[in-house]
Image (cartoon, helix red, strand yellow):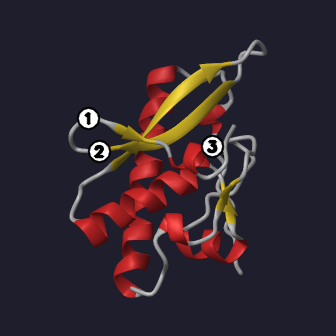
Amino acid sequence: MYAPTLAFASFNGNVDWDLSSRHMTILLDAWTEVDVAWLEAMPGIPNLYDSGVRYYADKFWEGPWLDCVTAALMRFADCKSLATWRCAELRVRHGIHAVPEFSRVLLSDGSQWFHVFVRLPDGTFEDPSRLLGMK
């Protein structure tokens, strides 16, 4: 498995929140489209909640961004990978245009922590991480 490395200064706590948020939105939208492409190309990929994948916590800036195929093989993923997979699944398999959203927590050392979840078209939220083992 090839894992390209991307490095962003956007999430180290020293960058303006509005700019970090813009970068985060771009990345989540792109990652959702990666999963959309996988689900369209490989209809046998299981639905997230049927896949056996569990939530795995990592430091946002250190953890990998897993596409749905890799997460299914590894059987774990963090919030960003779970949310983008679920959004893609809802779009491709159910015609629901869900989008990944995030919240931010500021830590005492000045760093930022992001949590990613799913926003449904009716304005409600779904949190795959909580449903898959996040405490």
Labelled pair 1, 3 in contact (Cβ < 8 Å): no
Can residue 31 be spotted in the picture?
no
Q: Earlier in the sequence, mark 3 or mark 2?
A: 3
Labelled pair 1, 2 in contact (Cβ < 8 Å): yes
In this figure, which residue is indicated by the disc labeled 2?
Answer: 120
Q: Above or below — where is 129 with respect to 36? A: above
Towards the viewer: 60 or 71 = 71
> Which residue is at a point 52% across and 70% down the rendered structure image?
50
> Which residue is at a point 65% across and 25% down the rendered structure image?
112
Measure the alpha-carbon separation of dots 3 and 2: 28 Å
Q: Quadrant where the N terminus lies?
A: bottom right
Q: Secondary structure at mark 3?
A: loop
Q: Above or below — where is 12 with respect to 89? A: above
Horizontally, residue 123 falls left or right of residue 75, namely: left
In this figure, which residue is indicated by the disc labeled 1?
Answer: 123
Q: Quadrant where the C terminus lies?
A: top right
Q: Above or below — where is 113 with respect to 101? A: above
Within-10-Å neighbours for mark 3: few <14, some 14–19, many 20+: few
Measure the alpha-carbon separation of dots 1 and 3: 30 Å
Q: Which mark is residue 8?
A: 3
Q: Position of residue 105 (x, y in %)?
A: 61, 21
Can residue 81 be spotted in the picture?
yes
Q: Secondary structure at mark 1?
A: loop
